[in-house]
Image (spheres, rainbow, N blue to C red):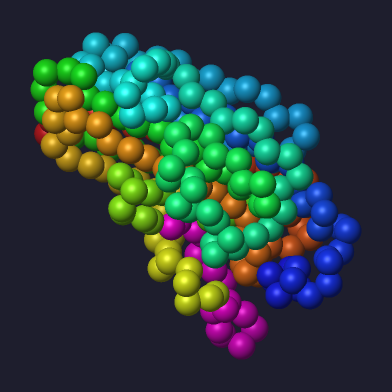
Amino acid sequence: MRLSKILEVKKRKLRKRIFTLGVIITGVLSIAFAVITFYGQNAGNFVMSMDYDSYNRGIQLSSDREFTNPTPRLMTDPIDDARDMTYSWLKIEDVLKTDGNFVDPDYDYVAYTFYIMNSGFETVDITYHISMTENHNNISEAIRILIIEDDVKETMYQAIDPLDKDGNLPYYPQIMPTPKFFMSNTVLLRENFLKFEPLQVKKFTIIMWLEGYDPDTNDTVLGGRIRLNMNFSIMKDE
């Protein structure tokens, strides 16, 4: 179902409960940081185990820049009855001003801000990737993942769009960022940041939503759910 159809009528009640979205973002002191999202009514908590090697090298996580309560686990509140929306509806400025979980009073989407600090004594290189461990009703074809680093670097990720019967790509508004495509069906993206110095703090904001302009956003995603793991680690020396 295209976004234009959503805006047309008050939309079919069938769309009123596209899926239930519960999100737990779990960080570990190893900079093994996980985003676990569940679509479905019985979403439960998910906890990652610590990597003591990275912890011993001084990598810490926090939901605030002051690191008043560094913790091995960070969790967002669950989101219920999420419906399809689009990039221009995101309140990005408000999200960036909100540490931890951001709740939009108008639309339902995942939005979470956290911080990573190198409290050790060595400069290290960090790599991170997002992998998918569950994908019910092929909901991964319709989601968008936006990662914003330090309030500046904004990158949107999505599955590759199929061509229509006439060989054309789907229409998206010009305001939409140029996407980077998922790497595979299991590893969606892989990135890094280098020379992470002692006492340096880096900010990450993650936003995820069901994109209404995507042709894969249709009734087949009803009841869909997905589970994603976002893992950070210190890059090993070659």
Dominant secondary-structure state across the stretch colored magenta: loop
Compared with 236, 145 (above or below) is below
Image quadrant occupied by the N terminus: bottom right
Compared with 107, 26 (above or below) is above
Residue 166 part of the magenta-drawn span: yes
Tally the numbered discs: 0
Q: Position of residue 168 (x, y in %)?
A: 55, 84
Closer-to-camera residue (19/61):
61
Quarter of the figure with residue 218: bottom right
Image quadrant occupied by the C terminus: top left
Quarter of the figure with residue 69: top left
Residue at image position (49%, 58%) is 158
Residue at image position (34%, 48%) is 151
Whether residue 136 is visible to the viewer of this picture, yes or no, is no
Quarter of the figure with residue 16: bottom right
Q: Position of residue 156 (x, y in %)?
A: 43, 57
Compared with 96, 69 (above or below) is above
Residue at image position (86%, 64%) is 12
Query: What is the span of residues highlighted in magenta in the rendered image?
Result: 156-171
Q: Is residue 161 left or right of residue 130?
A: right
Closer-to-camera residue (40/155):
155
Q: Is residue 200 left or right of residue 160?
A: left
Residue at image position (56%, 85%) is 167
Q: Position of residue 90 (x, y in %)?
A: 55, 56
Compared with 92, 235 (above or below) is above
Q: Is residue 169 left or right of residue 9?
A: left
Q: Position of residue 205 (x, y in %)?
A: 42, 42
Q: Is residue 190 left or right of residue 198?
A: right
Q: Residue furthest bottom?
A: 166
Residue 168 part of the magenta-drawn span: yes
Whether residue 103 is visible to the viewer of this picture, yes or no, is yes
